[in-house]
Image (cartoon, helix red, strand yellow):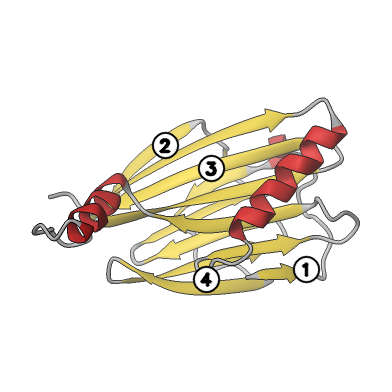
């Protein structure tokens, strides 16, 4: 789902992003709820980037006031019944054309997916925050076994990716998260 957001950026640079686990639902500009691994997963676009709520987990990457942690390169945590892993990278593109193409490629890749949410902020078609669910390696293996007609175990996890594009600095922050039930 793609939507145009009626609000300016609350975070204008990649280095303004913070990371928090366990926050309650914040005011969202758009929400997409998708079922995965027996959980309702909310992909939430905020005026200050994103929040994902999946069962016992709340992940927020946004411009947060107060005691929020800076965006880490990696983080992990155990949440009731699940293991959570997070990774983030920032690509700083020196060329505006390359930046625009990269953002357009992400938007095109997610355009027809029912498990993805893309929001455009006013002022630039490349001021974008996007979230998409992805299958874990285990889930892909289960699907491949099913296609081969061999017995498969139950789905035990899933992941999601996000992209935060900043045209004014030509930065794209990319995150990847996984939520897996230990076997």
Q: Tell me if 49 is positioned left or right of 114 in this view.
A: right
Label ID, residue 176: none
Please state which of the two labelled residues, at mark 2 or mark 3, is closer to the viewer: 3
Residue on which the image places disc 3: 175
The kind of secondary structure element at disc 4 is: loop
Residue hosting label 4: 114
Are there few (<14), some (14-19), or many (20+) residues within 10 Å of tag 4? few
Foreground: 46 or 5? 5
Instruction: Tell me the CA gap for discs 2 and 3.
Output: 11 Å
- Distance between mark 2 and mark 1 Cα atoms: 29 Å
Label 1: which residue?
Answer: 5
Q: Which residue corresponds to the image point at 59% horizontal and 67% vertical from the top-left? A: 112
Q: Residue at x 27, y 54 (%)?
A: 139
> Which residue is found at the position 19% from the left and 60% from the top?
146
Measured along the vertical axis of the image, is residue 76 above or below residue 29?
above
Label 2 environment density (alpha carbons within 10 Å; few <14, some 14–19, many ≥20): few
| Residue corresponding to mark 2 | 75
Task: For marks 3 and 4, give the CA distance.
Answer: 20 Å
- Residue 181 in percent (x, y) is at 21, 54
| Chain-order first, disc 1 or disc 4 | 1
Mark 1 secondary-structure assignment:
loop
> In the picture, residue 167 is in which quadrant?
top right
Is mark 1 in CB contact (under 8 Å) with mark 3? Answer: no
Frontmost of labels 3 and 4 is 4
State whether residue 169 appears in this view. Answer: no
Q: Classify 10 Å Cα crowding around label 1: few (below 14), some (14-19), many (20 and above).
A: some
- Disc nearer the start of the sequence (2/1): 1
Residue 6 percent across, percent down from the top left: 82, 71
Answer with the quarter of the image where residue 102 lies.
top right
- Image quarter where the N terminus lies is bottom right
């Amino acid at each position: 789902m793609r939507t145009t957001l009626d609000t300016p950026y609350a975070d204008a640079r990649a280095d303004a992003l913070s990371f928090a686990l366990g926050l309650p639902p914040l005011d969202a500009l758009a929400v997409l709820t998708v079922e995965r691994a027996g959980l309702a997963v909310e992909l939430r676009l905020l005026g200050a980037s994103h929040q994902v709520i999946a069962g016992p987990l709340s992940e927020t990457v946004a411009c947060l006031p107060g005691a929020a942690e800076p965006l880490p390169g990696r983080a992990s945590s155990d949440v009731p019944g699940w293991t959570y892993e997070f990774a983030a990278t920032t690509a700083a593109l020196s060329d505006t054309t390359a930046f625009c193409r990269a953002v357009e490629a992400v938007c095109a890749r997610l355009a027809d997916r029912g498990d993805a949410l893309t929001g455009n902020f006013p002022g630039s078609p490349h001021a974008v925050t996007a979230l998409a669910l992805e299958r874990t390696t285990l889930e892909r293996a289960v699907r491949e076994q099913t296609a081969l007609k061999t017995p498969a175990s139950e789905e035990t996890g899933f992941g999601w990716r996000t992209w935060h594009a900043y045209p004014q600095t030509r930065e794209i922050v990319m995150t990847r998260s996984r939520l897996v039930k230990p076997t």
